[in-house]
Image (cartoon, coloured by chain):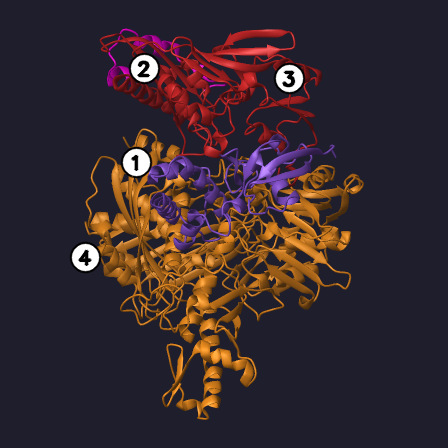
Chain colours: A red, B purple, C orange
Amino acid sequence: MGGLTTLSGFEYVAPTDLTAAATALRDAGGRACVLAGGTDILVQLREGMRSADLVIDVKKIPELLQLEYAPDSGLCLGAATPCYQIYTTADVVNAYPALVDATRIIGGWQIQSRASVGGNLCNSSPAADSIPPLLVHQAVCHLAGPEGRRSIPVSDFCTAPGKNSLQPGELLATLTLPPQPANAGSAYQRFIPRNEMDIAVASAASWIELDDSRNAIKSARIALGAVAPTPVLAEEASQFLVGKAPTEENFSEAGVLARQVASPIDDMRGTVEFRVHLAGVLTQRTLALAHQRVQDS
Amino acid sequence: MTKKTHVTTTINGEETEFLCEPRQSLLEVLREVLDLTGSKEGCNNGNCGACTVLLDGLPVDSCLVLAVETEGAEITTIEGIAQQGHLHPLQQCFLEGAALQCGICTPGFIVGAKALLDRNPDPTEEEIRFNLAGNLCRCTGYDKIVRSIQEAADRLQSAT
Amino acid sequence: MNTPVPGSQYKVIGTRPIRHDGMDKVTGKAKYGADVKFSKMLYGRVLRSPHAHARIVSIDTSEAESHPGVFAVITTSDMPDLVDKMADLGEGVVNMAHLGDNVLAREKVLYKGQAVAAVAASDVHVAAEAIAKIKVEYEPLPAVTWVLDAMREDAPLLHDNVFTDDMGKKSDKPSNVDKEIHFLKGDAEEGFAAADVVVEREFKTATVHQGYIEPHVATADWNEDGNLTVWTSTQGSFACRAQVAEILQIPISKVKVVPCEIGGGFGGKITVYLQPVAALLSKKSGRPVQLTMQRDEVFEGTGPTPGSFMRVKLGATKEGKLTAGEAWIAFDAGAFPGGPIGPACMCVFSCYDFEHAKVDGYNVVLNKPKTQAYRAPGSTHAALACETVLDELAEKLEIDPLELRLKNAATEGTRRVDGPVYPRIGCVEVLQAAQASDHWNSPLEGPNRGRGVALGFWFNCGLKSSASAHVNPDGTVTLTEGSTDIGGSRASIAMQLAETLGITAEEVHPQVVDTDSVGYTDVTGGSRVTFATGLAAYKVGLDIEGQMTSRAAELWDCSPENVRVESGVYSHNGDSLTFAELAEKLHATGEAVVGRATVAPDGATNGFGAHLVDVEVDPDTGKTTILRYTVIQDAGKAIHPSYVEGQMQGGAVQGIGWALNEEYFFDDQGQMKNASFLDYRIPTFLDVPMIDTIIVEVPNPDHPYGVRGVGETPIVPPPAAIAIAIHNAVGVRMTELPMSPPKLWKAISDQS
């Protein structure tokens, strides 16, 4: 709102351990917010969509900045690890291509130097680019609160636009992504009117695992963004592919089935009709790209 | 008004101390406190790239960094790109290639392009366009910016 | 130093020297509007209307005034009463009450984002906090945001003092239609009766913004003696001075405007917004005050270009001779009267020779920001309509679209529908260059791909410019001018002085100075600066050359007529001195050499351009990718070809943005939903290809070096060229801007 745009006065703390961060968050009683990359939160604070008396910078907590990968244990990603670090790490690029696709298109490079997947998840936008990839890669969220820790599947994390299952005083510490089997590949695409710097009108992530012959799909997962109050898994479409040949026809059919979970809204970014249509198109395209990646591996 | 915090950083190679309120962005402190007005404010929400600086070597929108976050950090602004009275090849090529019209986006482009060439000494047109898509220019149509960055890359490579 | 172009008659013109202000702009040293700082300076913020249309019942500023750190709060009650005062500010007569209302609303707010009050405080955060404490009570009124709705008899009336001006005749009751324009040449009915083929289409275009990257900014210091200095980013320091003096009702000589470097304008930085407000805050606080807009304020509170509804009908014989044209054009003016309906009506058929044509135009006020000039104002809309219909005509007649244009192209002697007869113009040469281009002659293959061509015109104006220059002892010349440099004009003006004097571009030091330091100079706009201020520089050069000749004659004790001057070398009877050698002797032998000139060239310089574009459409998403783009334009004479190309490329890309994605989204309350660079989608680096350019040079007979304006024409053809290319790619005729993915996808789906 123009002249009103400002950051209201707040205190700033940068604790170095998770418990201190969680305690500060709890003690502020809803008047604190967590700062990772800041690329969403500072805009929201400035535009009055959010207000806070305390900003808790979590980038001094080593656990939240980690990026550990091993082929047999998978990926452990600190909640504040910036996108840039993810897509410049070769092992991650090979193992979780859908996630890497997303991290390369969240804002421009300047944003990616700061923005984190954890922050993108906690912001819980229906259009968040990293969430469909986290869904198809079956990420687990590890949360820390003043009372201790708990873990939940990423599919249980987002509850509504901008809302999630973090409890008061609780914050996201890390995300773990299981190791990738042989013959698996994934991809993420979004539709935007420009080619960069935009919010998804609709998006899809696909993950497929082929059998050893690579002639049949052993397992598949499809997730859609910006077509429902939260990013959603398209279970029926995913199931349809199991046992099928990885062909354009089957991918196309999966696209048609995926559209059934789309319940989008009409807004300036797109109509209901357009978004539902795009969900199908993007499902088909990401399946084809994921398949291509298996073939190329 | 919130109490001010003391911050120590290195800016363009010089240790720099300043006082700031937690709500002040790095861009605001650079421009209003330290008189480094080369970084420009175009949108104040991370969509235009005119305020691009390097934070520990990586390009960031300085409007989306709190100044208090930069304790101990190393920052490079447009004022730190030319060295010992010599323009960086990017600056020279922007001049020769007429890669600026109004010039308001130029500092952000040069800082961003330096970050790119530091990592990728021979970028393709596509790589230049992709990596600098967070920098908006409304005057040039981008054509001469691509050419000038490529020319600078050539000069840097032939110099080494 | 640049080497002259081989075979050229010129030594400097046509070369590509480094611009004089370039060094400061690549090192971050250049001082733009927001970079000026003064001791004790305060920072201001503006309170803006949340309603698209409402009566202001009351404003209570008491809490804001007592907010710690606040030094001044102002509302419209701090401004002089400007009720219905008319003033000529050089750009036509303006109703000062409207201009004042657009700076700070008086009784009603007419659009969301209209300024209502302002605060000066110790920093921007404090100012914003104080702004939030101003209490305004509004009585909301029904709003209207679509031009055809606003024209209806039962539409909410914005002003009770706006009457339709129908070619000089005033209506007897107030209306939202502030102006009607009617042009007639021949008899359109007769022309259509003679046609073998007639095509008629309706078009709609969305409101779009200039989108300069630098937000509006002004700093004012109102001294105790009543002298006011304003530092600002403006396209015209004298235009700014006149508006500020009129709005504040103070003598013009009390106002000095210091033009800062300007971060883009495209027509949008001519009108004042913040300057008078900063001045009043300074007066009230007794300190310098700086006001800077946030990006959403730029979108919501400053002038976009009109949204429009247009209907164009063309007829032609089967041989491809146009027999008649008819256009009906309605533009939204935004909240106050004025706008580019006139130019739109003059441009719509300006590229072709019509025997019979009829144009009707309507300018309509409604509840959107007051529109302002945007690069060739009105002509881009008009070209979309005319060129698209012409392409359909070519398709029906099975005539090559460039051939059809050539058959009907305007030439010297063609009389436009609005009256003027063209002097020597380059319309045909531009079309021929397009026809001969590599782009036009390269095959385009592949599914869903298409090529489009469109032609565009802009008048380019002359107006007034002043300049002076003095010769330094080292042989350099310092040039003083008043045209704010928005994209390299210091270089193009200095080069013309250098050419005239036979020195190098680097030996001229151009300075853009404030309104107390140079003679009256009109705005940097209308593609006039290289033409008109360049003409002034040329005349300054002649003045200096005359004085230098006299001084050489004194040295050689001969008559000035016997001194020969060639390429900056003065000679007589075996004696010769270069310009620099003669300059060195000036100090010891007499008075300084100072040249001056002031010009007001009449008429237009008539710029024509043709654009070629190849697109690929993704039929599954409706997204259009620009594969290849070529701009062909008559520059008359390109002084600095790099910056001419830059104008052609930049204009084309703005036009691409307008064509494909840019638009204001309003909700049903008239609230803009996308006031950010995230959702108002100007082209990014990754959205466009390289833009090829072909400069055509058909010298302008009214300029010593043949210069025509080049800045505006390049934005005219893109939407039409792209609409035509899309048709050739996927078979649908798009008649609505932007041709954004959802709309194009729908059109393709409906077709199949």
Write down the residue under mark 1. Answer: C617
> Do pointers 1 and 3 mark residues of a single chain?
no
Question: Mark 4 against mark 2, which lies toward the viewer?
Answer: 2
Tell me the amino acid under the disc marked 1.
Val
Mark 3 secondary-structure assignment: helix
Q: Over which residues does the magenta segment extend?
A: A228-255
- Numbered badge on residue A254: 2
Write down the residue under mark 4. Answer: C319
Write down the residue under mark 3. Answer: A21
Asked whether residue B131 appears in the rendered view, the answer is yes
State the image coordinates of residue B56 (x, y, percent, origin top left).
52, 33
Q: What is the quadrant of the C terminus of chain B in the image? A: top left
State the image coordinates of residue B158 (x, y, percent, origin top left).
33, 45
Q: Callout 4 environment at 10 Å: few (<14), some (14 to 19), or many (20+)? A: few
Q: Earlier in the sequence, mark 1 or mark 4?
A: 4
Question: Mark 3 against mark 4, which lies toward the viewer?
Answer: 3
Q: Label 4 lies in what chain?
A: C
Tell me the amino acid under the disc marked 3.
Ala
> Do pointers 1 and 2 mark residues of a single chain?
no
Q: Label 3 lies in what chain?
A: A
